[in-house]
Amino acid sequence: MVLPNFVTCLLATGLGGVMIVAMLEKLVPVVPSFGLYLLFGLTAGSEFSAVVPLIVISAFGSMSGSLCWYYLARFSGAHPQLRLLSNWLGRFSAVRQASGWYSESVTRMALVQLVPAARVYSGLASAVVTIDAARFAIATFLGCLIWNGALISAGWMVRHF
């Protein structure tokens, strides 16, 4: 199997490179996450035991990217334009109901990580509705374990079966 040069450079950086790429995928989603994580699985080692650290490290990287969005929104909340946006969104009953539904449960916050477009910007929404950073980080990590784990495992299985 011949891989493009950028892929071999990425793989040469090891798990640290995987974590950085997973974080960047959340910050600048140029490549769809399903393609990226399938590629990680396709290029993983021949034993399935090599996939487990890949899943955990990529989930940590994804969580780090989400936390970047979270803290960006949290710290810029003092900015007048963002405060106006938050107040405007708070007027709609559907937004209030959705934020209440979302913030009630860690499971629900984790499940948002399974929705491709929503998983990227969930940190912004979580900061606006003032969800605790620790709860958000735990939920995001668990959701990313499921999403990344399923895709990386699928990529590994495609190559080996």
Image (spheres, grey):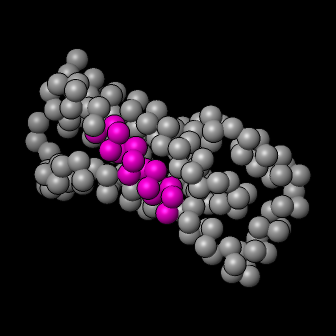
Residue at image x 32%, y 44%?
57
Q: Outermost residue toward the left?
A: 2
- In terms of depth relative to the viewer, which is nearer, 19 or 29? 19
Above or below residue 133? Residue 146 is above
Residue at the (48%, 43%) spot, across then down = 141
Q: Is 160 contained in the magenta span? A: no
Which of the pair 132/39 is nearer the observer?
Answer: 132
Q: Which residues are magenta?
A: 54-68
Above or below 149: residue 69? below
Dominant secondary structure of the magenta stretch? helix
- Residue 103 position within the rendered picture, expressed as x and y whole percent measured from the top left: 71, 46
Please determine whether, in this image, residue 10 is positioned above or below residue 42: below
Q: Nearer the viewer, residue 122 or 52?
A: 52
Work out which residue is located at the far bottom of the displayed protein and give it. Answer: 80
- Asked whether, in this view, residue 90 is left or right of residue 16, the answer is right
* Residue drawn at x 26%, y 32% as measured from the top left: 51
- The image shows residue 74 at horizontal and vertical percentages of 63, 68
Q: Is residue 62 magenta?
A: yes
Can you say which quadrant of the picture contains the C terminus? top left
Residue positioned 80% across, 52% down in the render: 95
Residue 124: which quarter of the image? bottom right
Picture quarter with the N terminus? top left
Instruction: Estimate the x, y position of residue 138 in percent, counting from the top left.
Output: 53, 44
* Residue 4 visible from this viewpoint: no
Q: Position of residue 38 (x, y in %)?
A: 32, 37
Res 158 quadrant in image? top left
Residue 140 located left or right of residue 87: left
* Whether residue 100 can be seen here: yes
71 above or below 144? below
